[in-house]
Image (tube, rainbow, N blue to C red):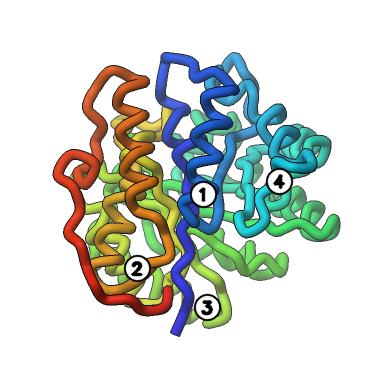
Amino acid sequence: MKQIIIHEVGLRDGLQMEKQIVPTEQKIRWIETLIASGVDIIQLGSFVHPTKVPQMADTDALFKYFNEAGHKPKNVVLSGLVLNEKGLERGEACGVEMYCMGVSASETHSQKNSGMSTVEASDRIVAAAKQAVAAGKRVQVSVQSAFGCGFEGYVPMDRVLGIVEKYLKAGLKSISLADTAGHAYPDQVTSLFEAIFKLDPTIRCTCHFHNTYGLGLANCFAAMRVGVECFESAIAGLGGCPFTKVAAGNVCTEDFVHSLQRSGLCNDIDLPKLVGLANEFGRFFHREMPGMVYKTGGVTNPVVSPRTV
C-alpha cells in the first residue's frame, strides 16, 4: 500500500507558456488556495533566466514570501525547478525546501531546453543534486522526454534507463519520468516503470504526463498500478514545455483528483476549491481551460477511504 502524492505544478509548468504575465500578488492568492485545498506539494516556479521565461521572473520573491513567518504552510512542501548551478544558488538564497532537476533523454530537446547535451546536462545535474542533498534538502531528479520527443520521435528505453542508473549510482532515488512531448501511452508507461523498479525496487517514482493526445489520465492510472506514488499535475490543465515541438497542457489536477475520489481515494483534498480555482484561471485568461470537471461539475462519491492504493 502506497500513499498517493499530488504535486501541483500549475504555477510553474502551467503558467510558463502564458504570454499574459500574472502579477505576483495574484500568484500568491492562487497559491494560498492551493495550500488550503490539501495538495501535498506545490511547485512555485523555476529558476530560469527571466528573458527566456518572463513568467518565472518572480520565483525568488514567491519563495521568500512563503518562507516568512505567518506565510509558511505547515503541511505542504514547496518545490522549485532548477536547470543548473546558478538556479541552485538562487534557490538556496530564497529558502527552497525541495528541488526538482531534470535531464532530457532527447539530445535535441536537451539542447533547446538547457543549451547542453544530455551527457553534459546529466553530469551537472547530478553534481547539483548531490550538493542540495548535502545541504539537507529534498531532491527529485527527472528524465524529460522519457516517452518520446516532439523533434526526434521514438526515445529508446535503454537511453532512459541509462540516465536512471546514473542517478542511482549517485544515491538519488526520488526519480520522475516526464512525458514532455505527450507521446506516452499506457502499455509503454507500464513497461518503462516496471523496468525502473527492476533496477531498484526502493525507488520513489513520480510521473509527469502531458495530455497532448488525450491519454494523460489513462497514463496516470497505468503508472499507479505498477507502483508509482507521486503524480505531477496542473490546475485547470494548463501548461506545456515551451521548448518542445507541440506544446500541450498537463494532466488536469481537478480532473485527476475527481477520478481518484470516484474510487474513494484522496477524499481529504478539497475538490471544490480546485474547481473554483480553475474557474478563476478561466476568468483571468479570458478563455475556456482544458480541464473538464470545472465545466461539467463532479460526481459525488460517498465512499471515504485513506489515500492509499
Give the structural element (helix, strand or loop) at label 3: helix
2 and 1 marks in contact (CB < 8 Å): no
Q: Is residue 118 left or right of residue 169?
A: left
Work out how far the residue at label 4 is from the one at label 2, CA to CA, in angstroms.
32 Å
N-term-proximal mark, 4 vs 1: 1
Name the residue nearer the viewer: 180 or 98: 98
The residue to which callout 3 is attached is 199
Q: Earlier in the sequence, mark 2 or mark 3?
A: 3
Dot 4 and dot 2 residues touching (CB under 8 Å): no
Inter-mark Cα distance, 1 to 3: 37 Å
The image shows residue 138, relative to residue 85, as above or below, that is below
User: Dot 1 corresponds to which residue?
Assistant: 36
Res 140 visible: yes
* Nearest-to-viewer mark from 3 and 4: 4
Q: Tag on residue 72?
A: 4
Q: Position of residue 47 (x, y in %)?
A: 65, 32
State how far apart marks 2 and 3 are (Cα). Answer: 16 Å
Type of the residue with mark 3: Leu
Residue 133 position (above or below residue 151): below
Mark in the foreground, 2 or 1: 1
Q: Residue at x 52, y 82 (%)?
A: 201
Q: Quick one: label 3 or label 4, which is nearer the N terminus? A: 4
Instruction: Give me the disc on residue 233.
Output: none
Location of mark 2 (residue): 223
In the rendered image, the quadrant that contains the N terminus is bottom left
